[in-house]
Amino acid sequence: MRVTERNIDNNGQMLLISEVEVEGWWTTLESADAEVIALYRDHATSEQFHSEFKTDMDLERLPSGKFDSNDLVLNLGALTYNILKHIGLCGLLDEDAPVRHSAKRRRIKTVIQELMYVAARLIKRSRQLWLRFG
């Protein structure tokens, strides 16, 4: 349980009567209270990943009315999602990463735009193949 007492509102205005907010959680977890509250606070992260999976990978509507086809599409989508997340993580930690600002994670859409949509040219010269980016 967490009790928060506020004497100032969001705009900085002092309140005549304090605002009291009481939050409570029921759980079967064998964790400390602070850990349960931190887990609850982090629930929006899973919603963010769900939104990313649906919108950035265009899997909002499944293509078929047949279960097996949709199962295949979802499995391929999950595989693609995990590969793109790994590429994004590697690109985030690399020294030459195309970063506009520091971040802890990248959305799939950003990974696709910055790392997948890169123009490249295959050059064959002196019995060697060169791949030039840019």
Image (tube, rainbow, N blue to C red):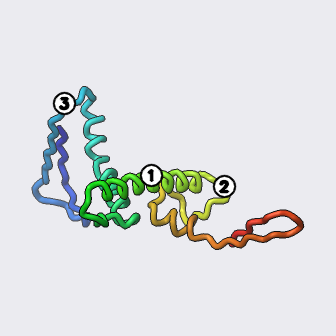
> Which of label 3 and label 1 is nearer to you?
1
Mark 3 — residue?
28
- Sequence-wise first label, 3 or 1: 3
Q: Could you tell me which secondary element the residue under label 3 belongs to?
A: loop
Residue 70: name its quadrant.
Answer: bottom left
- Judge from the rendering whether residue 41 lies leftward or rightward of residue 108; answer left or right: left
- Sequence-wise first label, 2 or 3: 3
Does residue 3 appear in this view? Answer: yes
Q: Could you tell me which secondary element the residue under label 1 belongs to?
A: helix
**Are circles 2 and 3 on residues that touch, CB within 8 Å?**
no
Say which of 22 and 42 sits in front: 42
Q: Is residue 120 above or below residue 6?
A: below
State the separation of the CA atoms marked 2 and 3.
44 Å
Q: Amino acid at mark 3?
A: Thr
- Judge from the rendering whether residue 52 lies leftward or rightward of residue 129; answer left or right: left
> How many residues crowd mark 1 within 10 Å: few (<14), some (14–19), many (20+)?
few
